[in-house]
Image (tube, rainbow, N blue to C red):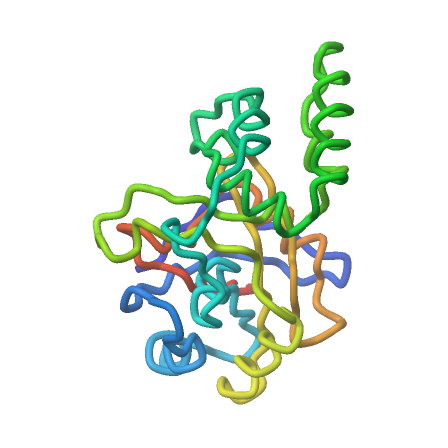
Amino acid sequence: MVNKYKDPLTTKKGKTIKECIPIRTDIIRPNDSIIKMAEIYAKPHLITGDIVVCSEKAVAISQGRVIDEKDVKVGLLAKLLSRFVIKSPYGIGMRDPRTMQVALDMAGRPRIIAAAIVGGTIKLFGKNGYFYRIAGPEVSMIDGVVEHRFEDLNRYIVPPPKDPDQAALKISEALDGIPVVIMDINDLGGSVILGRSHSDLPASEIEDYMRYDNPLGQGTQQTPIGILRFG
């Protein structure tokens, strides 16, 4: 069960992140309890000094923050803007008009149009990523519809979780105070903590460590939770 994703990393406080242990759980569906999942599957493996890492998508799904693709009314603007999104080998993302429409609904048409214009202009100079900088972090964390071996999960678009600090705190309380972070980690090398149960956690070091590879997955991996172990 132990996978070492990179060499140990020493934090500013002199502690070394030695390994990340992916925890296999049941598939998390809308309104399932991520707290119970953590209690059942992660808690038996925890030792003093561990930090629990939860996938932001799994937390959002457990909060019921899913949008059925059938409920997305795709407009002409979403269809137009999605055509100009760069194709990525890691997923269709905003190239899907349905995901773009959700972004328009969340951030508003003026902001997304501005992001598209500025991002597209700067892209001409070989620089990418400005669309999401302007559109905002919530837009960048929208998970679009993906092919999933569980058919009932194929149709969902998932916005980021609500109040991730509070969600992390509730999970931590169920784990007898073990620190918890909720993270958005993607296959493009992005890694960011959205919520944490303890304010003194070594956030930048955790992000650096998890950026190397992503052991969390809600697909065939069924590992939405991981344990960072120090040594």
Quadrant of res 34: bottom left
Identify whether 20 is placed above or below 30. Answer: above
Front residue of 62/35: it is 62
In the image, residue 35 lies at what x, y percent?
45, 80
Residue 116 horizontal side relative to residue 231, left or right: right
Q: Give the quarter of the figure containing the C terminus.
A: bottom right
In the image, residue 60 lies at what x, y percent?
50, 64
In the image, residue 81 lies at what x, y percent?
59, 27
Q: Give the quarter of the figure containing the N terminus.
A: bottom left
Residue 226 horizontal side relative to residue 176, left or right: left
Q: Residue at x 66, y 70 (%)?
A: 196
Identify whether 147 is placed above or below 22. Answer: above
Quadrant of res 125: top right
Residue 151 horizontal side relative to residue 67, left or right: left
Residue 115 horizontal side relative to residue 217, left or right: right
Q: Residue at x 70, y 31 (%)?
A: 131
Identify whether 34 is placed above or below 1. Answer: below
Q: Residue at x 75, y 40 (%)?
A: 111
Please give the count of numbered marks on the rendered protein.
0
Quadrant of res 222: bottom left
Q: Residue at x 54, y 31 (%)?
A: 76
Front residue of 38/155: it is 155
In the image, residue 213 lies at what x, y percent?
48, 42
